[in-house]
Image (cartoon, rainbow, N blue to C red):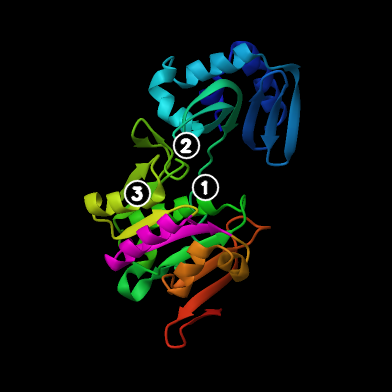
Amino acid sequence: MNYAEILKYFPRRVAEVINIELNNNKNDSLEEIRLRAGRRIVLKFTKGEKILNGLVEIEDILHTLQNICDNSIYSYQNQICEGFITIKGGHRIGITGSAVISNGKVTNINYISNLNFRIARQIIGCSNNIIENIIDIPNNNIYNTLLISPPGAGKTTLLRDIIRNLSSGIENIGFKGKTIGVVDERGEIAAMYKGVPQNDIGLRTDVMDNIKKSEGMKMIIRSMSPQIIVADEIGSKEDVEAINYAICCGIKGIFTAHGNSLEDLNLNPAISELINKQIFEKLIFLDINQKGKINSIYKLNKCLNQYENF
């Protein structure tokens, strides 16, 4: 990967220190760059962390933030209030500091002192071995599907590639591409930068980002008439209402949730409600030890009104 597009945001002194370490670890993949005022830079690689020499000054944080915001922090105020900014290439910068609260909502973050660059890395084809469990081939459609795993098991990466496959179509099995509406609340699926997806999400995909899933699902259904709707990490009562609305409109859905078992899912009242209503036709649990691999699948048996492991 060419890291020049990321290093350009840092002050020269900081960029040079990071670049030296990147050259020393060419065989490892960079996942995060963490800058904390008054402390040392931490690089997170796939195989471990590297702590660099020298302290980060508050001026380094502010200089970096100005570059991220194209020297206009005010124009990025809404993203800052959400706690992250997405830059070209789909890389996402987490922001922390002193939150300013008004009427129960974050209206600003003052004294920003910590930045976390999360390096985007799309894995084209990572869903190829899973997609056959989601597609209803005889009807050229999909099963309403919930992907489940604990955090860090690759749900979002997998979901992104599933969207790409379903949207563009899969020629070797005769699957014709579908119009997909993605509600990307945290900007991690499509990684929109100035309205343009930085990730390959397929030919027929429309995106609403930086909006609550419950609101975004209803909006994109009304405005774009998707055949499939997709959202990451559902779990609220409002999400349930929006998903019910989508299914009642005849739209298929693919969603993700945190958990490791059926018992975990039933501890969440909102997701438990969807399962009890048998909204999902497939529950796919991902392997926590092998990213992108399936641990188990539960399929809805409509005759018995229950999910069966197969």
In magenta segment, residue 215: no
Residue 54 left/right relative to 118: right
Residue 56 left/right relative to 267: right
Residue tagged 3: 215
Provide the residue span drawn in magenta.
234-258
Residue tagged 2: 104
Q: In which quarter of the image is the C terminus?
A: bottom right
Residue 109 left/right relative to 260: left
The three-letter amino acid code for the residue at tag 1 is Ile
Residue tagged 1: 123
- Asked if residue 201 shows in the view, the reply is no
Q: In this view, does 36 lie above or below 232?
A: above
Q: Is residue 280 above or below residue 155?
A: below
Q: Of label 1 and label 2, which has the lower sequence position?
A: 2
Density class for disc 1 (Cα within 10 Å; few <14, some 14-19, many ≥20) is few
Q: In which quarter of the image is residue 245?
A: bottom left
Q: Of label 3 and label 1, which has the lower sequence position?
A: 1
Specify the farthest residue to the bottom.
303
Give x and y (percent) for residue 228.
33, 59
The three-letter amino acid code for the residue at tag 3 is Glu
In magenta segment, residue 251: yes
Specify the farthest residue to the front.
103
Distance (Cα) linking label 1 and label 2: 38 Å
Give x and y (percent) for residue 12.
60, 12
